[in-house]
Amino acid sequence: MRYVSPALNVMMAAARKAGRHLIRDFGELENLQVSMKGPADFVTTADKRTERILIEELSHARPGYGFLAEESGATEGKDKTHRFIIDPIDGTLNFMHGIPHFAISIGLEREEQLVSAIVFNPVTDEMYIAEKGQGAYLNEKRLRVAARKQMKETVIATGLPFLGKEGHARAGAELADVMAASAGVRRFGAASLDLAYVAAGRFDGFWEHGLSAWDVAAGILLVREAGGMVSEVNGGTRVLDGGSILAANDMLHPLLSKLLKGATV
Ligand code: IPD
Ligand code: CA
């Protein structure tokens, strides 16, 4: 049976409320795409408003909890043991381009341990949830990471650096090696959903460098509660702020880690 803690309920309700506004904004964007000004300002406003709704809802239900959020940064709460980690729109570039692949991501830490997580795609109405020790679910369905054992059978997701970001040469080298070893590589553009898809067994693995805590907090718990492994690419354990992430089942994780570490620029 799916167990939803009171905190997780609060997080789901906040995401659904913010999601309703986001869907309206996403519809509006179609008109803005063709305007001279372009959608950038509009998207910034949508991002900020989504974050404001989430923080309002969460702090109303859980007064005193701290926050780490993409737009407003870190806010200490009176309760030093709890912190929400929020990405209001993960996949902002997709959102801006009218691509319906973006999500609201919320993780909850208790004493620096991730205990509850949601990743919500308001367009597909997919609500991924996880509770420490209670498993991961997509809507009502229990999630398990894929069972594939051989690299040649796998679909692996990644995120690639873009204009102004470092690591282009390394990304090219890593990509070449994973392309040569797998059935296919995907770059969908929302790290929280990449991790949710690993939890759901859609992707066999995911790696990316240069992500922030809000991109991955919820997704890390989803993968772990679906039976998967998450580490830094080099195997390190600082998954929230170590600068890279690698998620897969326990057979593929060491294979991918070896492949990526061996990629030479
Ligand atoms: C981005 C997405 C993307 C990843 C970028 C992130 P944002 O988050 O997760 O997949 O490749 O590095 O910054 O900016 O859309 O919230
Ligand atoms: Ca993000």
Image (spheres, grey):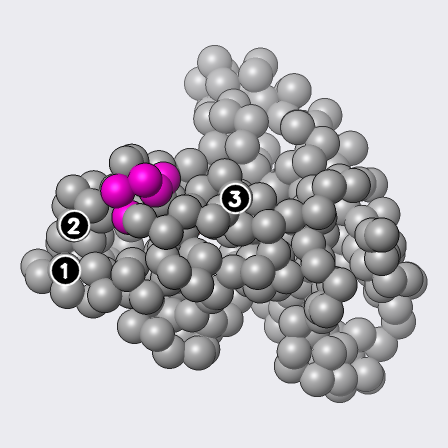
Residue at disc 3, CB closer than 8 Å to ligand 1: no
Magenta-colored span: 151-155
Q: Residue 136 carries which label?
A: none
What percent of the width, then of the height, locates residue 235? 35, 74
User: In this view of the protein, can residue 232 be seen by the observer?
Assistant: yes
Please name the residue that numbered disc 1 is placed on.
263
First in sequence: mark 2 vs mark 3: 2
State the residue at coordinates (57%, 60%): 227
Identity of the amino acid at label 1? Ala
Rate crowding at label 1 as few (under 14), some (14 to 19) or many (20 or more) other CA atoms within 10 Å: some
Q: Determine whether 122 is above or below 191 in the image.
A: above
First in sequence: mark 3 vs mark 1: 3
Q: Is residue 136 left or right of residue 153?
A: right
> Closer to us: mark 3 or mark 1?
3
Q: Is mark 1 on a helix, strand or loop?
A: loop
Q: Which mark is residue 177?
A: 2
State the residue at coordinates (65%, 37%): 121
Q: Determine whether 123 is above or below 43 in the image.
A: above
Q: Is residue 112 a member of the stretch shown in magenta?
A: no
Contact check, label 1 and label 2, Cβ < 8 Å: yes
User: In this view of the protein, can residue 196 be seen by the observer?
Assistant: no
What percent of the width, then of the height, locates residue 50? 70, 45
Q: In this view, does 73 lie to the left or right of 126?
A: left
Q: What element carries label 3?
A: loop
Determine the CA span between mark 3 and mark 1.
25 Å
State the residue at coordinates (70%, 84%): 111
Q: Nearer the viewer, residue 23 or 35?
A: 23
Q: Is residue 233 left or right of residue 217?
A: left
Q: What element carries label 2?
A: helix
Q: Determine whether 96 is above or below 231 in the image.
A: above
